[in-house]
């Protein structure tokens, strides 16, 4: 009886792992791509922040340059209101003897009037 023996030099290696081709890029390529993408994003964000800062600076300076014009408009409105108030006072107090039109304060200094705009009673009834 002849026994069955392995071939001379032994059997070939047994393939126990799957032999699949690698899918996608190497991890180092993904890491480099993400680093480049983040760097570009930070670069663009920095440019946007600089632009927002410049726009804010421009807005502040435009407001600073508009202050004299706006103050002149407020002064014109104050003078107009003061003249209208003086005219109303003259009309109301024309029958009072000895009434002197002008300031109610005991001073010759100019006192800036403070106006408070209140809604009329008609408007109050409409809102309820």
Image (cartoon, grey):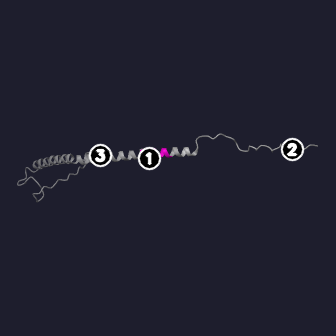
Secondary structure, magenta segment, majority class:
helix
Identify the residue at horizontal 27%, vertical 47% (top origin): 61
Disc 2 on helix, strand or loop? Answer: loop
Q: CA distance from mark 1 to mark 3?
A: 24 Å
Disc 3 on helix, strand or loop? Answer: helix
| In this rendering, position of residue 40 left or right of residue 107 | right
Q: For mark 1, what is the residue?
A: 42
**Residue 53 seen:** yes
Q: Position of residue 47 (x, y in %)?
A: 39, 45
| In this rendering, position of residue 37 left or right of residue 89 | right
Q: CA distance from mark 2 to mark 3?
A: 93 Å
Q: Nearer the viewer, mark 2 or mark 3?
A: 2
Q: For mark 2, what is the residue?
A: 5
Q: Is disc 1 in contact with disc 2, using a CB cutoff of under 8 Å?
A: no
Q: Position of residue 24 (x, y in %)?
A: 59, 40
Disc 1 on helix, strand or loop? Answer: helix
Q: Position of residue 100 (x, y in %)?
A: 7, 54
Q: CA distance from mark 1 to mark 2?
A: 69 Å
Q: Nearer the viewer, mark 1 or mark 3?
A: 1
Assess whether residue 74 is covered by the magenta stretch.
no
Q: Position of residue 34 (x, y in %)?
A: 51, 45
Q: Nearer the viewer, mark 1 or mark 2?
A: 2
Identify the residue at horizontal 36%, vertical 47% (top origin): 50
**Residue 128 seen:** no
Q: Which residues are magenta?
A: 35-43
Q: For mark 3, what is the residue?
A: 58
């Amino acid at each position: 009886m002849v026994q069955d023996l392995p071939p001379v030099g032994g059997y070939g290696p047994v393939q126990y792992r799957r032999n699949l081709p690698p899918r996608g890029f190497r991890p180092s390529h993904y890491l480099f791509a993400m680093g480049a993408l983040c760097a570009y994003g930070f670069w663009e964000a920095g440019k946007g922040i600089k632009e927002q800062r410049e726009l804010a600076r421009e807005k502040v300076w435009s407001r600073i340059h508009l202050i004299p014009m706006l103050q002149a408009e407020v002064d014109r409105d104050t003078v107009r209101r003061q003249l209208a108030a003086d005219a109303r006072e003259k009309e109301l107090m024309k029958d009072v003897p000895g009434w002197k039109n002008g300031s109610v304060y005991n001073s010759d200094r100019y006192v800036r009037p403070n106006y408070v705009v209140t809604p009329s009673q008609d408007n109050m009834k409409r809102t309820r």
